[in-house]
Image: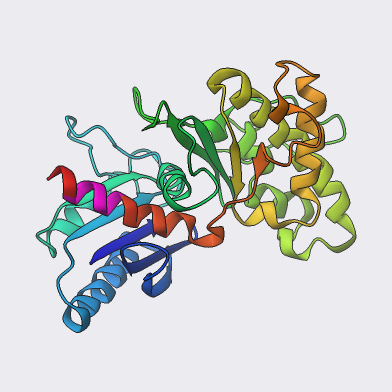
Amino acid sequence: MYAGIEVGGTKLVCAVGTGPADLDATRAFPTTTPQQTLGAAVTHLAEQQRRHGTITAIGVASFGPVGVDQTRADYGHVTATPKPGWSGVDVVGWLRATFDVPVGFDTDVNGAALGEHRWGAARGLDTFAYVTVGTGIGGGGMAGGSLLHGLLHPEMGHLRVRRHPEDHYAGGCPFHGDCLEGLASGPAIARRWGRPATELGSDTEQAVALEATYLAQLAAAITYLLSAQRIVLGGGVMKLPGLLEAVRRRTGALLGGYPDAPELRSPLTTYLVPPGLGDRAGVLGAIALAEAAEHSA
């Protein structure tokens, strides 16, 4: 039995199982302080272990930035994050203090990408991207069948983008102001209109136009830089009515027919796709990280 933990900027989701067919004991906790949030997850998983048997490995897919290089001292830590109280938190160490099992660790978006590759919308692909648009904007994925890592890990949400000419919001990123995340994340929508994306009402159409302008720039950049076979777009903001279709149209316009591949011809319905696992992509990706950690131990 594996345990999967998805640590998001708004909530932490944890579950046990081996995949979509037997995912069980799924619980969500608000992401408040590390002590409260990780403590609640540890208590829940310990209870599941008492009820159902030994947890053999744990996988964690966490918001970032995080340390993913196992040769560095910050491996398993959240590093310099705008999330108050979370910079420097040793997530892996916290779990190992209670559970003496292998712990797999990666970004939330790489975790979701792994889940989609194993069971969802990226099955059979070896080079693709997973993007989440929610409390923050992040991107991960695979190249040549390996999760994307390098100096650190991809930070697609901090791509600098051209502003929409009618957008006068200054941007909310504490590091860059009007980068992609600063302009198109859930909090940016809420600050721009004074209410969250789910309550935009008559402003939804304008919000969709702005979001599509910015997210299409990311999709085009991924296409040119990564030569992705597919881009999976998830997260709460992507549930805005008409947004996915608008991103497809705008991305097609930006690409302008180059490169000429069947997947990149309008309407891009097989290229820009929603997660096959829905909201479970992150926690199932964490389950896949746990399985990989057990096999490599």
**Spot occupied by residue 118 in the image (x, y as percentages of width and height):** 41, 48
Tell me where residue 233 sits by quadrant. top right
Horizontal relation, residue 62 to residue 297: left or right? right
For the point 64% across and 34% down, which residue is it? 180
Colouring of the image: rainbow
Numbered range of the magenta stretch: 289-294
As for residue 179 lying within the magenta part, the answer is: no
In the figure, residue 225 lies in which quadrant? top right
Residue at image x 30%, y 49%?
289
> From this viewpoint, which residue is outermost toward the bottom?
51
| Quarter of the image where the N terminus is located | bottom left
Q: Give the side of residue 96 with respect to residue 48, left or right.
A: left
Q: Nearer the viewer, residue 221 or 62?
A: 221
The kind of secondary structure the magenta stretch mainly shows is helix
State the residue at coordinates (74%, 36%). 268
| 206 or 35: nearer the viewer | 206
